[in-house]
Image (cartoon, rainbow, N blue to C red):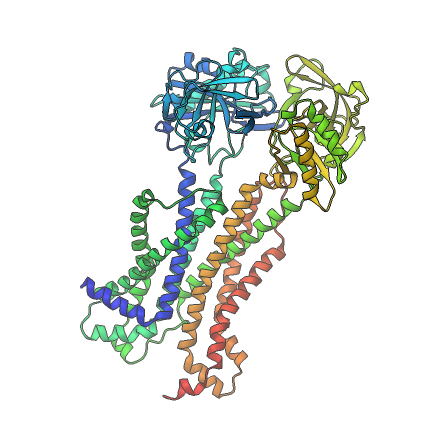
């Protein structure tokens, strides 16, 4: 019986090649898109799951609001480890990490010596042996229990060992970092999986850092991770930790004044990658759970659109299969067998589509990886879950897409069919009209979303940020030159095509974050704390960056008092509460009390992400040769770059010349949004294409079922345009209804997405109108192909049998 169902289904599908192609192609594209999104979602959800104790690992997180400054901080105090291990028996183990961007410390650069040159290494962290008790980091050489106990010891990954020593067993070897620090390798671990919220190559002993010996509160630059015992009441522990933190703070009463607050929370390890976007000073930039939700919905939408196409096309073909059903019933076929026959056809189409979809997904995976910045691959391990998942999808989609056509077609009464009374085509199909509205509502929703996302990304790219990032070359590793960095800067300023140059680690591209507290009075009162960015710059910084000085003066190398001078932005002045801040003193407590006097005010500019409002900024006159920024104005950049590299080689022939352009660094800040936009636009386009495939098929069958009507109309003098309009109007009405449904929903959803940006576009009425007009145009073009073909047909061909 089953063999007969399959054979009959195969013959029926082969007989209607156009119908079969539209369904198979539409489902294949839909399923392939879903597979790619599933790969992406599963990868995002798998972060840190390689840790065998992941369900018991938590990161200590600080949530605080002080004087209107609210923030969530991934870092916490150095003293927590001793308190946690001696006070809370439910804490099984504690480990600490501090990376190169430790809070309140200048970002550090690490150069590891290899042969006669130095290699800039970014993936370096300071930690301790307890790291290997908390996280699952298998060690292939060395003892994990003591590997990082001694100062100046190091654990490296297997690939790093091969990079520097061409072998993995390198315990006892020496690493020279920044020319002066000697580290002994005491362990080699397997490479950390890519699905980890941190991925370091070098683990240096925390005991090598001076703050490791600190027993007092005040240094909050560490990432504290806790391994809790089974059954721990996390909320109760958070409350106890909060009480300790408040009592140990500089002024405990501050946190109960006004709307100030201080809370200690425990962030579950599996949540760090996707649900930690608001935290400052993370070990690495994570993903966004919203994007996972959005793309999951897009996958469901696309699959639904493909299923709707199948249902629409199958029911639209009802008249051509009505006699088949009638004959089968007259010959004694029960309805259940007819349902089984039609469901078999549906499952067969879906199975064929699934096989083709796997091929499509495999072919498109490299392009998708490039777009999503992933390293996804279809491996043998993938098939352990992919094949069962595909089987479930084939059955679910097959029965879902084929259920209505099967029940609808099998319900025909044979006597009515054989009398020729079943002629239901496009007209009168309420469910079919509803499904067309449903799929085009989704398509228009995605289309509006695409326009809004494009406009926002374009706005970010072209917004006037208050500084000039065009043709600014950033020489990254200038600190390796030492005192000669200033010589290089002065030499570069003499080159034709160079307007100016400045030395500072801090570029206003949104990737630096160094905050400190400044106070308006010598007597420190934490209630008056102004949390501000604190940058060290030189006398050429403002001019090189194109910053506008609106009050006071710039730094001057001829004025010795400028070593205690400060230039602030307008946001700082507003926090300070002074109409004229020039010559006002502010104070900072860092290894003693430091006093500064304000000499200038610059116009606010966007030095951070456009997701945030412009915050306070203070710039002090100090030597910082972390990077040299060169403002250029030349039509021949390559020639000027060669000259700049030549000047570098003259001073440091053995050091690599590494650089970037500031506009590229700025764009990199929004790489996640750019990837999201590119993926959303691609998937939206596919959804619209799939919807149009269904509309194309419906138009073809509508024209076929009204073939005789068209012939009579043409004989009576109807024009081609009149016939095209008659055939198109029913579909256009459905598209118009879809626009009315989708537009308000899309407007609401995209407004919610835009709320993440402090600086954003407004959704204009003409954006919505454009989306609607494009939807109508695309639908009309799709329909008109079949409509014009039917209108141009010779009426004699359709009426000759009458």
Closer to us: 556 or 752: 556
- x, y percent for residue 264: 49, 22
Quadrant for residue 256, please give it: top right
Quadrant for residue 759, please give it: top right
Closer to us: 261 or 167: 167
- x, y percent for residue 226: 42, 22
**Quadrant the N terminus occupies:** bottom left
**Quadrant the C terminus occupies:** bottom left
Residue drawn at point x = 42 percent, y = 62 percent: 434
Asked whether residue 798 is in view, the answer is: yes
- x, y percent for residue 563: 75, 19
Closer to us: 225 or 750: 225
Residue drawn at point x = 63 percent, y = 57 percent: 766
- x, y percent for residue 338: 24, 67
Residue drawn at point x = 41 percent, y = 53 percent: 363
Q: Is residue 683 left or right of residue 377?
A: right
């Amino acid at each position: 019986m089953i063999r007969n169902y399959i054979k009959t289904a195969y013959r029926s599908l082969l007989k209607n090649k156009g119908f079969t192609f539209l369904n198979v192609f539409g489902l294949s594209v839909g399923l392939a898109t879903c597979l790619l999104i599933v790969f992406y979602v599963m990868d995002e959800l798998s972060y840190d799951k390689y840790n065998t104790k992941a369900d018991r690992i938590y990161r200590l997180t600080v949530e605080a609001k002080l004087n209107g400054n609210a923030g969530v901080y991934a870092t916490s105090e150095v003293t927590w480890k001793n308190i946690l291990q001696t006070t809370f028996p439910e804490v099984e183990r504690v480990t600490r990490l501090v990376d190169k961007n430790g809070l309140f410390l200048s970002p550090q650069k690490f150069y590891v010596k290899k042969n006669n040159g130095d290699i800039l290494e970014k993936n370096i962290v300071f930690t301790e042996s307890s790291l290997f008790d908390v996280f699952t980091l298998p060690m292939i050489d060395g003892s994990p229990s003591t590997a990082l106990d001694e100062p100046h010891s190091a654990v490296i990954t297997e690939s790093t060992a091969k990079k520097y020593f061409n072998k993995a067993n390198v315990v006892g070897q020496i690493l020279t970092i920044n020319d002066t620090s000697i580290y002994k390798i005491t362990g080699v671990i397997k490479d950390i999986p890519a699905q980890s919220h941190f991925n370091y190559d070098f683990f240096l002993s925390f005991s090598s850092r001076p703050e490791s010996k600190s027993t007092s509160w005040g240094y909050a630059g560490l990432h504290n991770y806790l391994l809790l015992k089974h059954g721990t009441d996390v909320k109760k522990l958070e409350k106890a930790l909060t009480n300790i933190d408040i009592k140990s703070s500089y002024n405990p009463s501050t946190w109960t004044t006004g709307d100030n607050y201080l809370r200690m929370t425990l962030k579950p390890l599996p949540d760090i990658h996707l649900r930690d976007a608001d935290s400052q000073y993370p070990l690495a930039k994570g993903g966004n759970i919203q994007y996972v939700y959005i793309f999951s919905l897009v996958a469901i939408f696309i699959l639904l659109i493909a299923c709707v196409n199948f249902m629409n096309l199958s029911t639209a073909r009802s008249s051509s299969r009505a006699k088949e059903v009638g004959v089968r019933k007259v010959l004694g076929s029960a309805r259940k067998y007819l349902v089984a026959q039609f469901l078999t056809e549906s499952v067969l189409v879906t199975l064929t589509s699934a096989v083709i979809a796997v091929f499509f997904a495999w072919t498109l995976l490299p392009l998708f990886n490039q777009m999503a910045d992933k390293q996804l691959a279809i491996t043998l391990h993938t098939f352990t879950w992919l094949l069962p998942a595909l089987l479930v999808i084939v059955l679910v989609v097959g029965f879902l897409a084929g259920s209505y056509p099967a029940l609808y077609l099998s319900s025909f009464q044979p006597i009515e069919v054989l009398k020729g009374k079943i002629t239901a085509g496009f007209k009168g199909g309420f469910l079919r009209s509803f499904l067309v509205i449903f799929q085009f509502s989704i398509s228009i929703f995605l289309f509006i979303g695409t326009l809004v996302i494009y406009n926002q990304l374009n706005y970010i790219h072209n917004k006037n940020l208050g500084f000039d990032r065009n043709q600014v070359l950033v020489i990254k590793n200038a600190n390796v030159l030492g005192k000669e960095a200033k010589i290089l800067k002065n030499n570069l300023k003499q080159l034709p095509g160079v307007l100016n140059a400045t030395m500072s680690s801090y570029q206003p591209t949104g990737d630096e974050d160094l905050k400190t507290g400044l106070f308006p009075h010598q007597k420190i009162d934490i209630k008056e704390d102004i949390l501000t960015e604190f940058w060290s710059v030189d006398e050429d910084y403002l001019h090189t960056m194109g910053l506008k000085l609106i009050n006071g003066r710039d730094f001057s190398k001829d004025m010795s008092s400028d070593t205690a001078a400060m230039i602030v932005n307008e946001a700082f002045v507003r926090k300070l509460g002074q109409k004229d801040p020039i010559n006002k003193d502010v104070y900072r407590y860092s290894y003693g009390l430091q006093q500064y006097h304000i000499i200038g005010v610059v116009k606010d500019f966007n030095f951070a992400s456009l997701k945030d409002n412009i915050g306070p900024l203070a710039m002090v006159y100090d030597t910082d040769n972390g990077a040299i920024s060169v403002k250029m104005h030349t039509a021949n950049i390559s020639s000027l770059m060669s000259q700049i590299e030549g000047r570098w080689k003259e001073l440091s022939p053995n050091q690599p010349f590494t650089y970037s352009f500031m506009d590229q660094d700025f764009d990199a800040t929004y790489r996640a949004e750019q990837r999201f936009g590119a993926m959303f636009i691609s998937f939206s386009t596919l959804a619209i294409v799939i919807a149009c495939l269904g509309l194309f098929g419906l138009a073809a069958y509508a024209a076929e079922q009204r073939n005789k009507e068209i012939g009579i109309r043409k004989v009576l003098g109807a024009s081609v345009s009149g016939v095209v309009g008659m055939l198109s109007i029913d579909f256009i009405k459905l598209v118009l209804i879809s626009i009315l449904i989708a537009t308000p929903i899309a407007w609401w959803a995209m407004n919610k997405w835009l709320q993440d940006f402090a600086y954003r576009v407004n959704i204009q009425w003409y954006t919505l109108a454009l989306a609607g007009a494009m939807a109508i145009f695309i639908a009309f073009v799709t329909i008109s192909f079949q409509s014009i073909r039917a209108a141009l047909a010779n009426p004699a061909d359709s009426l000759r049998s009458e």
